[in-house]
């Protein structure tokens, strides 16, 4: 054997050589690189050289020490060694190629025997990152009203455009006017739903189910808002979705009515409790340069009878019941009685008259204007007569007469005037109205017309007389 042959290890016996490790990982931007170790099964008895072959298409991705030439790495072998090493590091660039693997193989040689681990894989970990393609998240248009009794879930979709480029998240916040009327899937945590958006996603969704009950809880107003995102998703142009869950027990009940006459207007808005009773009546009066708002709160006993109304701070009306009807109403201001009224009934059980009394400066009570009511046999009021006492006479004077006639076979949502909160003086809609003021010789007869919505409920009433027009608008839950 010639000692000038660089590809052989000179020894009396052939040594076995192999890589110590099967694989090794280095970062593309590592300055130190890594040491690759080859082991021999015994120490060498003479100096020589071994060759390592780097796969052709990856030769330009690494640097070695000793330096390889065209993919051939020649490692000098000294006498008396049982281990060889060389350093390898990746060639750093700014090209995003992803992780890459190259293979180094021990070349055949007559100077040693190849062991089992004659190949070695080097994994170069990519250090360059690509800015992800951003996707916008926007709600798809959805119905804005559902019924409490709807059994089918409502699905809300969030469109992601373009498709998500990295794993992302979208967080939806829920703001609702009341709890316990709906549930979402996925379930919300602290009023937030977190939706996972894996790579490639083009839409996300969640569902809402209404919770049906037999109580009046009122309509539920919900607002879904995309509040935050993670990954490659950003907020889109439609980040809010509103929904109203209509309470089926409340549906069709009178919500408000508004009376307009010239520059003056009065609106009453009704709120109901869980049993369907009136809980509050909010009255707003608009006159030129003056707007006032009053809240009338109702209180009931265990028999569902109204026993008190609070009109405003310190002003209460307390009702006294007898034989299952109201016989007296006491008005208090800061717990001091300032007014009371006695109620009488006719043989049919209708309120036949009201006598109010007002506190005088001397502490006594004096009767004010008092009223007599006459009815048709169906319970609709026919005439409301207003009287006043006169000095030095036992006979009262008739002040005014209101006459209601031409009733229709259509249920009235509310009477044209209120006698008591538990009494509806007009069961159906009146078609005519006459107002006589006897002391000033005024007599107006109003023609009444109505407009109705598709389910038959009136939405507008117009009462017209010479020189006067009154318009009432009705709104419903």
Image (spheres, rainbow, N blue to C red):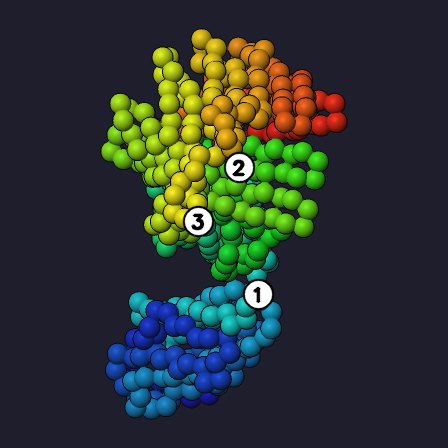
- Look at the numbered disc 1 and give the secondary structure of its residue: loop
Q: Residues within 10 Å of mark 1 (few under 14, many from 20)?
A: few
In the foreground, 375 or 371: 371
Q: Residues within 10 Å of mark 3 (few under 14, many from 20)?
A: few
Q: Look at 61% across and 30% down and name the residue there.
A: 473
Which image quadrant for residue 279? Answer: top left
- Looking at the image, the residue that sits furthest to the bottom is 79
Nearest the viewer among 224 and 217 is 217
Tell me residue 26's x, y (percent).
44, 75
| Residue 148 can be seen, yes or no | no
Q: Which residue is mark 2?
A: 268
Q: Nearer the viewer, residue 377 or 100?
A: 377
Residue 123: x %, y % from top left: 44, 69
- At mark 3, the secondary structure is loop
> Residue at the spot x=61%, y=19% of the render?
433
At x 35%, y 78%, the residue is 38
Horizontal relation, residue 83 to residue 92: left or right: left
The reply to whether the C-beta atoms of the residues labelled 2 and 3 are less than 8 Å apart is no
Determine which of the numbered discs, if any, sits on residue 114 in the image: none
- The residue at which mark 3 appears reads as 361
Vertical order, 8 against 184 (above or below): below
In this figure, which residue is indicated by the disc labeled 1?
Answer: 130
Point out the tag, 3 or 1, that comes first from the N-terminus.
1
> Marks 3 and 1, Cα distance to the nearest angstrom?
89 Å
Which of discs 2 and 1 lies nearer the camera? The answer is: 2
Q: Residue furthest right?
A: 467
Mark 2 and mark 1 lie on one chain; the one further toward the N terminus is: 1
């Amino acid at each position: 054997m010639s000692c000038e042959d660089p590809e052989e290890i000179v020894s009396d016996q052939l040594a076995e050589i192999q890589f110590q490790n099967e694989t090794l990982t280095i970062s593309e931007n590592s300055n130190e690189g890594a040491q690759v170790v080859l082991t021999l099964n015994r120490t060498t008895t003479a100096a020589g050289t071994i060759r390592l072959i780097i796969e052709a298409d990856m030769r330009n991705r690494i640097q070695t020490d000793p330096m390889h030439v065209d993919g051939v790495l020649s490692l000098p072998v000294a006498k008396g060694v049982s281990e060889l090493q060389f350093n390898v590091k990746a060639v750093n660039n700014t090209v995003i190629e992803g992780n890459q693997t190259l293979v180094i193989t021990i070349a055949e040689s007559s100077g040693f025997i190849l062991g089992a681990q004659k190949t070695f894989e080097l994994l170069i970990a990519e250090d360059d990152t690509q800015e992800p393609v951003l996707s916008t998240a926007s709600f798809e248009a959805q119905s804005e009203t559902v019924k409490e009794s709807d059994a089918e879930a409502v699905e809300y979709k969030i469109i992601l455009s373009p498709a998500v480029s990295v794993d992302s998240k979208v967080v939806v916040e829920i703001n609702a006017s009341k709890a316990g009327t709906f549930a979402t899937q996925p379930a919300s945590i602290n009023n937030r739903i977190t939706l996972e958006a894996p790579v490639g996603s083009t839409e996300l969704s969640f569902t809402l189910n209404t919770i049906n009950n037999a109580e009046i809880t009122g309509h539920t107003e919900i607002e879904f808002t995309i509040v935050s995102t993670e990954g490659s998703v950003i907020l889109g142009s439609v980040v809010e979705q509103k929904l109203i869950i209509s309470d089926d027990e409340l549906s069709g009940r009178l919500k408000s009515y508004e009376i307009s006459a010239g520059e003056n207007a009065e609106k009453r808005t009704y709120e109901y409790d869980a049993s369907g009773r009136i809980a509050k009546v909010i009255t707003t009066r608009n006159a030129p340069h003056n707007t006032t708002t009053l809240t009338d709160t109702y209180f009931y006993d265990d028999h569902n009878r109204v026993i008190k109304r609070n009109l405003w701070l310190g002003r209460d009306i307390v009702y006294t019941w007898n034989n299952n009807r109201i016989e007296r109403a006491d008005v208090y201001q800061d717990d001091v009685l300032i007014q009371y009224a006695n109620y009488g009934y006719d043989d049919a059980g209708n309120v036949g008259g009201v006598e109010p009394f007002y506190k005088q400066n001397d502490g006594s009570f004096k009767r004010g204007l008092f009223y007599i009511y006459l009815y048709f046999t169906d319970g609709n009021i026919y005439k409301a007569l207003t009287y006043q006492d006169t000095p030095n006479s036992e006979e009262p004077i008739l002040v005014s007469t209101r006459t209601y006639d031409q009733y229709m076979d259509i249920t009235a949502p509310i009477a044209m005037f209120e006698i008591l909160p538990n009494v509806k003086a007009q069961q159906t809609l009146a078609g005519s109205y006459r107002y006589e003021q006897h002391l000033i010789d005024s007599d107006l007869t109003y023609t009444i017309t109505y407009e109705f919505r598709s389910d038959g409920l009136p939405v507008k009433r117009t009462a017209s007389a010479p020189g006067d027009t009154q318009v009432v608008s009705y709104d419903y839950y």
